[in-house]
Image (cartoon, helix red, strand yellow):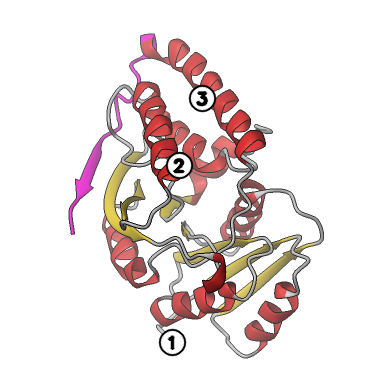
Amino acid sequence: MPSPSATHLVLIPSYNPGPKVYETVAEALRHWAPVWVVVDGSTDGTAEGLADMARRNAGLLVITETRNRGKGAAVLLGLERAQAYGYTHVLCMDSDGQHPAGLIPTFMETSQSNPDAMILGLPVFASDAPRVRVYGRRLSNACVNLETCGRHIGDSLFGFRIYPIEPLLRIMAPRRTMRRFDFDPEAAVRLFWAGVRALNIEAPVRYPDKANGGVSHFHYVRDNVLLTSMHIRLLLGLLYRIPRGLGRRSGSRSCRR
């Protein structure tokens, strides 16, 4: 296990991911410590399995919620605990095996060299990526390009990214939004509005099928309505911010690897 970091940790929100979560957590622990998992009301037995895993690994902390509140709410709980323990940054990744754990050190090194920035994964899709997801991302990214007046955020929905804790908590605490699947795009846009630079790094994305443990909790009607209302809210917020010099202190950069 790597030597524990005093500033950066890996944060994995988890809701009924099935056995794939154990592989995901083990891979993360191979590349970084500490790793925290927030179990968001899971009922599939993985809370108990992860707790047992944590008892055998000092680099793993499992935080268990008794009811499901959503991805953003799970991340918020992790952020609050992390700040209380003195951490300054979290790398968020999904529990279902989509994100490349092998790139954790690269992302962490970039963040340590640029502590004022958010480090955003720029997904590289394989040929088997579901077309509906690829096209949906393009639409969401087009909206985010409008909301940030440029292509500062390489991908609005890819959840493999590092956030500086203090500014993100300042943004989330007074709001009731950003608690479910609206978390990733709204967090990136509002951090950019707050002057946090965006650095984009390419990262491969996998979509395991059900036979290989793939799980998705995205509800196409409910969650697309949620995302649509979020973009309307952000576009209205843009109209307020344009006269004040949107993104005047922000910047973006893409890192091709």
Which residue is the site of mark 2? 132
Amino acid at pointer 1 = Met
Residue 198 in which image quadrant: top left
Describe the element under mark 1 as helix, strand or loop: loop
Q: Nearer the viewer, residue 126 or 243?
A: 126
Q: CA distance from mark 2 to mark 3?
A: 19 Å
> Residue 201: x and y, percent?
27, 53
Lower sequence index among marks 2 and 3: 2
Cβ–Cβ under 8 Å for marks 3 and 1: no
Residue 55 in which image quadrant: bottom right
41 left or right, relative to 216: right
Which residue is the site of mark 3? 231
Q: Is residue 54 magenta?
A: no
Is disc 3 surrounded by few (<14), some (14 to 19) or many (20+) residues within 10 Å? some
Q: Nearer the viewer, mark 1 or mark 2?
A: 2
Describe the element under mark 2 as helix, strand or loop: helix
Which residue is the site of mark 1? 1
Residue at x 47%, y 32% (from the top left corner): 190
Q: Main secondary structure of the magenta part?
A: loop
> Residue 121: x and y, percent?
35, 52
Q: CA distance from mark 1 to mark 2?
A: 38 Å
Q: Which residues are magenta?
A: 243-257
Q: Nearer the viewer, mark 2 or mark 3?
A: 2
Describe the element under mark 3 as helix, strand or loop: helix
Q: Nearer the viewer, mark 3 or mark 1?
A: 3
71 left or right, relative to 34: right
Picture quarter with the C terminus: bottom left
Relative vertical location of residue 179 with respect to residue 42 in this rendering, above or below: above
Q: Nearer the viewer, residue 56 or 217?
A: 217
Residue at x 25%, y 38% (from the top left corner): 252
Amino acid at pointer 2 = Val
